[in-house]
């Protein structure tokens, strides 16, 4: 049964690879063609090259600030959500701990009562042994 599932998972991987592989190679060939065409245009027209470099340089700082802003706000949202999740989880754990405390207290009381009676029986047995030995 394990061999059959392994064969099925292998055939699934091969099926996905068989479908994704040609699409990936097509995308790579298109990306290579677009890159070589862009490089040829930039090399042929220096004003376009200057424009592209200027816009890239001028937009680098705003894009970096926006990325930092997105990361900071995302961290705040996750922090608030995480705090809420932690509070709810803490409430569940506190309730469970409260219930567990009473079960453990009951177990302690039962163990104490059982220990008392077993200790009483043990000492009675020891006294009976001594009385029997002295008689």
Image (spheres, grey):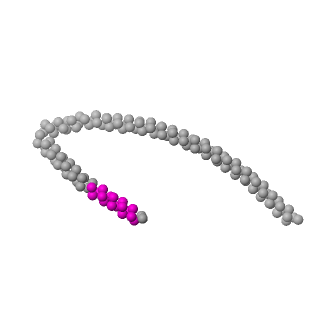
Point out residue 54 in the picture as x, y percentages from the top left corner.
20, 36
Q: Residue at x 31, y 35 (%)?
A: 66
Quarter of the rendering occupied by the C terminus: bottom right
Give the image quarter of residue 11: bottom left
Q: Find out whether residue 15 is within the magenta segment.
A: yes
Q: Residue furthest right?
A: 135
Point out residue 120 in the picture as x, y percentages from the top left corner.
78, 55
Q: Residue at x 15, y 39 (%)?
A: 49
Point out residue 104 in the picture as x, y percentages from the top left corner.
64, 48
Q: Nearer the viewer, residue 61 or 121?
A: 121
Give the image quarter of residue 124: bottom right
Whether 15 is drawn above or below 62: the answer is below
Q: Nearer the viewer, residue 27 or 12?
A: 12
Q: Find out whether residue 54 is within the magenta segment.
A: no
Q: Nearer the viewer, residue 34 or 20?
A: 20
Taking the image as shown, residue 51 lies to the left or right of residue 13, namely: left
Whether 18 is drawn above or below 82: the answer is below
Q: Which SS does the magenta portion mostly show?
A: helix
The mark tally for this picture is 0
Whether 33 is drawn above or below 3: the answer is above
Magenta extent: 3-19
Q: Residue at x 58, y 41 (%)?
A: 95
Point out residue 57 in the picture as x, y percentages from the top left corner.
23, 36
Quarter of the rendering occupied by the N terminus: bottom left
Q: Nearer the viewer, residue 79 or 24?
A: 24
Q: Residue at x 59, y 44 (%)?
A: 97
Whether 125 is drawn above or below 97: the answer is below
Q: Residue furthest left?
A: 44
């Amino acid at each position: 049964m394990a061999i059959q599932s392994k064969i099925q998972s292998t055939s699934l991987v091969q099926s996905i690879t068989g479908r994704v592989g040609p699409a990936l190679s097509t995308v790579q060939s298109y990306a290579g063609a677009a890159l070589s065409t862009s490089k040829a245009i930039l090399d042929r027209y220096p004003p376009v090259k200057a424009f592209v470099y200027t816009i890239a340089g001028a937009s680098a700082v705003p894009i970096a600030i926006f990325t930092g802003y997105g990361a900071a706000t995302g961290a705040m949202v996750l922090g608030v959500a995480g705090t809420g999740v932690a509070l709810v989880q803490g409430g569940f754990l506190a309730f469970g701990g409260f219930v567990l405390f009473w079960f453990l207290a009951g177990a302690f009381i039962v163990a104490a009562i059982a220990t008392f009676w077993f200790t009483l029986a043990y000492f009675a047995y020891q006294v009976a042994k001594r009385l029997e030995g002295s008689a």
